[in-house]
Image: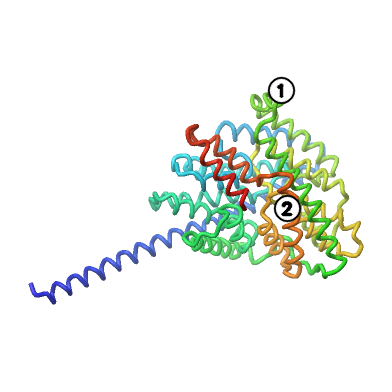
């Protein structure tokens, strides 16, 4: 056979192989993109049913506030029973589970934690918690749901490389934040700062694409909105920056104490109380529900649920809440977490921070009250999560105000430093370590949790 014909045949074969590889690449991308769109759809649907649950709870309170003394304990007990009996892995926020899975290489364990069954349960049980009056949010659970969807996409594509699978989990979690808050920049920063703790060139493209597609899907379904509306508050250089200092310190102390307490509780309570909780989790959840109902009755119903309306009214300046709101919401969030029912900490922390800022504002007459509320929100949130960049971008995007960016950053980083002095490990990282220890075999229980702690300590 002439050499020219051989060369032509080889060239045709090369072209066919390139075309086949290109087709496979585009097919893979379309499946990834479909998963990101699904994250956006599910996040919007989750928000809708969570709002329905809040409206139904309001109707119950309108009939008689004392009805919550029955509804809350029963609802919390039911949620705990379903979690313990049928949906182990759905408890808590959902962010620690996503972080833990980024450090796991056992696909069987990841499949259990990030299954669509657990994701579905996470949505229903968080909604049940909101209906019952627990001080929880849906944003953390949306992170686990988004990670579950993208993990399922990866398994469908038969991806066996842990690095590529971890990239999809990280992308799904970041997309969940972006779609839940309509804050695409915050989703990206959250993926880098909280989930990955580094900017990896190999995986950043997947995360960015998923965040954009999930965000666009959410906007297409509910419109381009800002979570807390629009504010024009400013913090001019001068006496007003005293608010940055005060909010940063107070937010860091209160947020750090909150995190330290939750980390300590997650490691187990000693003595009879700890044994009672371990042996009777459903009864304990009912008792937590009773405490929440009593707090709710004392606060006039303000401490139930996410605290979204209270935070929005404080930020917009349409309503001023007393210091008691900050204290009672703070306690309600701790009790809700201790109960073990599924639910996140993002929204309640924002609400507690707004209450803190509103209380501080009355002592700072030279600062704009709305700006102090924003500074209190970002400081407390940064103190709880020890993720100052995520806190800053979330608050900035949620109120559509770039004029206070520098003040928000300063307050967030100050709160981060104060919080780290009180609680040496970031909350979600410490909870992820606990989850890893319960999810991994004993022979692997030292290397992986230690790596998580190092990652969060160096963040």
Label 2 secondary element: helix
Q: Position of residue 330 (x, y in %)?
A: 78, 44
Tally of numbered tags: 2
For the N terminus, the quadrant is bottom left
Camera-side mark, 2 or 1: 2
- Its colouring scheme is rainbow
Disc 1 packing (10 Å; few <14; some 14–19; many ≥20): few
Q: Nearer the viewer, residue 275 or 409?
A: 409
Label 1 secondary element: helix
* Residue 417 image label: 2
* Residue 29 image label: none
Q: Position of residue 174 (x, y in %)?
A: 57, 56
Is 155 left or right of 406, judged from the image as shown?
left
Question: Which residue in the structure is indicated by mark 1?
Answer: 272
Outermost residue, top direction? 272
What residue is rendered at 68% in x and 27% in y?
A: 277
Residue 87 shows up from this direction: no
As drawn, 430 above or below 287 = below
Q: Nearer the viewer, residue 64 or 320?
A: 320
Outermost residue, left direction? 1
Residue 130 shows up from this direction: yes
Alpha carbons under labels 2 and 1: distance apart: 35 Å
As drawn, 29 above or below 131 = below
Q: Quadrant of residue 78?
A: top right
Q: Position of residue 457 (x, y in %)?
A: 62, 48
What residue is rendered at 48% in x and 33% in y?
A: 441
Is 206 left or right of 400, judged from the image as shown?
left
Is 327 left or right of 283, judged from the image as shown?
right
What residue is rendered at 63% in x and 41% in y?
A: 92
Closer to the chain start, of discs 2 and 1, is 1
């Amino acid at each position: 056979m002439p050499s020219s014909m051989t060369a032509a045949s080889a060239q045709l074969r090369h072209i066919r192989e390139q075309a086949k590889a290109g087709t496979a690449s585009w097919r893979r991308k379309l499946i990834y993109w479909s998963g990101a769109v699904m994250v956006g759809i599910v996040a919007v649907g989750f928000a809708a049913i969570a709002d329905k649950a809040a409206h139904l709870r309001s109707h119950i309170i309108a009939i008689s506030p004392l009805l919550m003394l029955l509804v809350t304990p029963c609802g919390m007990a039911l949620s705990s029973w379903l979690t313990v009996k049928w949906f182990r892995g759905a408890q808590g926020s959902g962010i620690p589970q996503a972080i833990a899975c980024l450090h796991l290489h056992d696909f069987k364990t990841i499949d259990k934690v990030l299954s669509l069954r657990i994701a579905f349960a996470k949505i229903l049980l968080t909604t049940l918690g909101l209906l019952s009056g627990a001080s929880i949010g849906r944003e953390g659970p949306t992170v686990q749901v988004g990670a579950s969807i993208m993990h399922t996409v990866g398994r469908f594509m038969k991806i066996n490389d842990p690095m590529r699978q971890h990239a999809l989990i990280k992308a799904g979690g970041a997309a969940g934040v972006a779609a839940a808050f309509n804050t695409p920049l915050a989703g990206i920063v959250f993926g880098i700062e909280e989930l990955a703790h580094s900017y990896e060139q190999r995986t950043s493209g997947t995360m960015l694409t998923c965040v954009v597609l999930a965000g666009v899907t959410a906007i297409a379904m509910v419109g381009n909105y800002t979570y807390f509306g629009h504010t024009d508050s400013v913090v001019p250089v001068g006496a007003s920056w005293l608010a940055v200092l005060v909010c940063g310190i107070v937010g860091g102390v209160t947020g750090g104490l909150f995190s330290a307490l939750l980390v300590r509780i997650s490691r187990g309570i000693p003595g009879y109380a700890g044994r009672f909780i371990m042996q009777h989790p459903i009864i304990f959840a009912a008792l937590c529900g009773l405490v929440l109902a009593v707090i709710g009755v004392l606060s006039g119903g303000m401490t139930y649920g996410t605290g979204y309306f209270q935070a929005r009214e404080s930020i917009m300046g349409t309503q001023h809440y007393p210091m008691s709101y900050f204290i009672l919401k703070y306690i309600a969030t701790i009790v809700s977490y201790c109960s073990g029912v599924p639910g996140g900490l993002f929204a309640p922390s924002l609400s507690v921070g707004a209450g803190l800022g509103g209380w501080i504002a009355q002592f700072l007459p030279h600062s704009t009250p709305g700006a102090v509320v924003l500074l209190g929100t970002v400081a407390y949130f940064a103190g709880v999560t020890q993720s100052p960049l995520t806190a800053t971008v979330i608050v900035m995007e949620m109120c559509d105000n770039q004029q206070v960016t520098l003040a928000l950053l300063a307050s967030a980083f100050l709160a981060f430093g104060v919080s780290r002095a009180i609680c040496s490990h970031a909350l979600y990282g410490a909870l992820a370590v606990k989850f890893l220890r319960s999810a991994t075999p004993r022979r692997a229980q030292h290397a992986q949790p230690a790596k998580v702690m190092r990652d969060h300590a160096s963040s």
